[in-house]
């Protein structure tokens, strides 16, 4: 499928080192939109839509509290820049602990990869056994990009047991029972991501999963 890819205005303070494009199909009707395929989840399951967006695009991880712990939730593509560039944006990488820097750098990914992750996760979420029905227009778009839906085929990428859409709503102490997971924890792109039970994701840690 060809993507529209029209550049959209960026309001972030990182706009000079960021990108933002329309990800609707080329030749689409109506206005350009970066995350149009999340519209139905945004309306009905905002927690799920926000999680997909956040996990796809931000350097989450530990709930860093102290000043030293470093910038929380930075766009992953911003973390591709070197220390000198980041300093111009007030991100003092040299003042952070090496372990924190390593963690932030490990989560760096290009804007394009992050956008592929967001769409791929949406495609996966709609195939969970108890997922809401996907509106036809969104389904057509996601299937054109990633292949036909196979409802109920989705499993935890770590334990391979079925994974339920209801787990998104099942939050303990602010942490959902379902997490975005990476087959190789150091690679953030569409082909390497999926969902995992929270305990499974914790158990996986920094290890790369064997190929299925
Ligand atoms: Zn467009
Ligand atoms: Zn699992």
Image: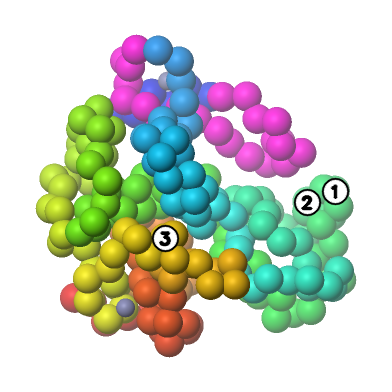
Determine contact: label 3, label 2, CB under 8 Å: no
Task: List the single residue furthest toward the top.
Answer: 29
Marks 2/1: CA–CA distance: 5 Å
Taking 154 as reference, is 122 left or right? Answer: right
From what the image shows, is residue 2 above or below residue 156? above
**Is the residue marked by circle 2 packed among few (<14), some (14-19), or many (20+) residues within 10 Å?**
some
Q: Circle 2 — which element? A: helix
Look at the image and tell me in which quarter the N terminus lies: top left
Taking 169 as reference, is 192 left or right? Answer: left
Judged from the image, the quadrant occupied by ligand 1 is: top left
Q: Is residue 165 visible?
A: yes
Marks 3/1: CA–CA distance: 37 Å
From what the image shows, is residue 136 above or below residue 208? above
The region drawn magenta spans 8-29
Residue 203, given in percent of the width and then of the height, sits at: 43, 87
From what the image shows, is residue 39 above or below residue 210? above
Q: Is residue 207 visible?
A: no
From what the image shows, is residue 58 above or below residue 49? below
Task: List the single residue furthest toward the bottom.
Answer: 203
- Of 49 and 99, which appears nearest the observer? 49
Label 3 or label 1, whichever comes before in sequence order: 1
Q: Of the numbered discs in the image, which one, if any, rests on residue 88?
A: 1
Residue 35, given in percent of the width and then of the height, sits at: 45, 35
**Quarter occupied by residue 93:** bottom right
Q: Residue at x 50, y 67 (%)?
A: 171
Q: Residue at x 36, y 71 (%)?
A: 196
Q: Circle 1 — which element? A: loop
Determine contact: label 2, label 1, CB under 8 Å: yes
Q: Label 3 belongs to which residue? A: 168
Q: Classify mark 1 as within 8 Å of ligand 1 or not, answering yes or no.
A: no
Q: Label 2 belongs to which residue? A: 85
**Is the residue marked by circle 3 packed among few (<14), some (14-19), or many (20+) residues within 10 Å?**
some
């Amino acid at each position: 499928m060809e993507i529209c890819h029209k550049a959209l205005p960026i309001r972030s303070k990182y706009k000079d080192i960021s990108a933002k494009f329309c990800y609707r199909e080329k030749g689409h009707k109506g206005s350009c939109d970066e995350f149009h395929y999340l519209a139905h989840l945004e309306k009905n399951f905002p927690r799920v839509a926000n999680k997909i967006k956040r996990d796809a695009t931000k350097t989450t991880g530990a709930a860093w509290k102290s000043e030293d712990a470093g910038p929380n939730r930075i766009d992953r593509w911003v973390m591709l820049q070197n220390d000198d560039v980041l300093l111009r944006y007030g991100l003092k990488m040299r003042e952070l602990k090496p372990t924190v820097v390593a963690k932030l750098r490990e989560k760096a990914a290009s804007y394009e990869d992050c956008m592929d992750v967001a769409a791929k996760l949406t495609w996966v979420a709609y195939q969970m056994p108890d997922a809401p029905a996907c509106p036809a227009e969104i389904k057509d778009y996601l299937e054109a990009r990633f292949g036909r839906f196979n409802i109920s085929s989705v499993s935890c990428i770590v334990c391979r047991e079925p994974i339920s859409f209801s787990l998104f709503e099942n939050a303990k102490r602010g942490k959902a029972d379902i997490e975005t997971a990476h087959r190789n924890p150091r690679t953030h792109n569409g082909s390497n991501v999926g969902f995992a039970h929270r305990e499974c994701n914790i158990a996986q840690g920094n290890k790369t999963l064997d190929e299925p």
